[in-house]
Amino acid sequence: MDGVEEQKHTRSQVQAKWRPSLGANVKINFDAAFDIKQARSGSGVVTRNTSGEILALKLTLHRAVLTPFAREVYTCLQAVLLGVHLGLESVTIVKKSQLNTLEKSVIGASKRDIQ
C-alpha cells in the first residue's frame, strides 16, 4: 500500500475508582488530554450525584493546543460553568493534578478568581 501512512495510537488507562463527594450533593470531575505532535487536545467534564449517576457529561475535541496548562485551566472553567448552567448551589469540583508546584499555584489563583 504505497502512499498510506501508518499511525500508532496510544491509549492510557487510569485505574481510579469514583468516590462520592463528602458534604456536597454533586461532584464534578474534569480532565484534559493532549497530543502535542498532532496539535490537538480533548477535555471532559462529568457531573455525578451522590449515587454516582451521571447528571451531565461534556466532551470537547480541540484542534489547537495553546499549552497543556492553559487547556487544564480552560477545562476547569468549563466545569464551573457547567455547574452554574445546571443551577447547582453546592458542588465539589475535582481535578487530580500532576502539574508542578508553580503551575498549581497559578491554577489556585485562577480558581480563587473564578470563585
Image (cartoon, grey):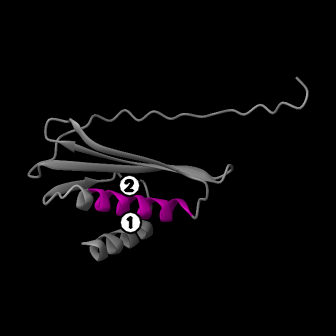
- Magenta span: 67-82
Quarter of the image where one finds residue 65: bottom right
Say what secondary structure mark 2 lies in. Answer: loop
Q: Residues within 10 Å of mark 1 (few under 14, many from 20)?
A: some
Point out the residue furthest to the right here: 2
Q: Are marks 2 and 1 in contact (CB under 8 Å)?
A: yes
Q: Position of residue 100 (x, y in %)?
A: 44, 62
Residue at 20% across, 55% down: 92
Left or right: residue 33 compared with residue 40: left
Which residue in the protein does label 1 denote? 104
Foreground pick, 20 / 104: 20
Q: Is residue 17 above or below residue 65?
A: above
Residue at 41% across, 58% down: 75
Q: Position of residue 82 (x, y in %)?
A: 30, 56
What quarter of the picture does the C terminus occupy?
A: bottom left
Type of the residue with mark 1:
Lys
Which residue in the protein does label 2 denote? 97
Residue 74: say if magenta: yes
Residue at 13% across, 60% down: 89
The secondary structure making up most of the magenta span is helix
Left or right: residue 73 compared with residue 34: left
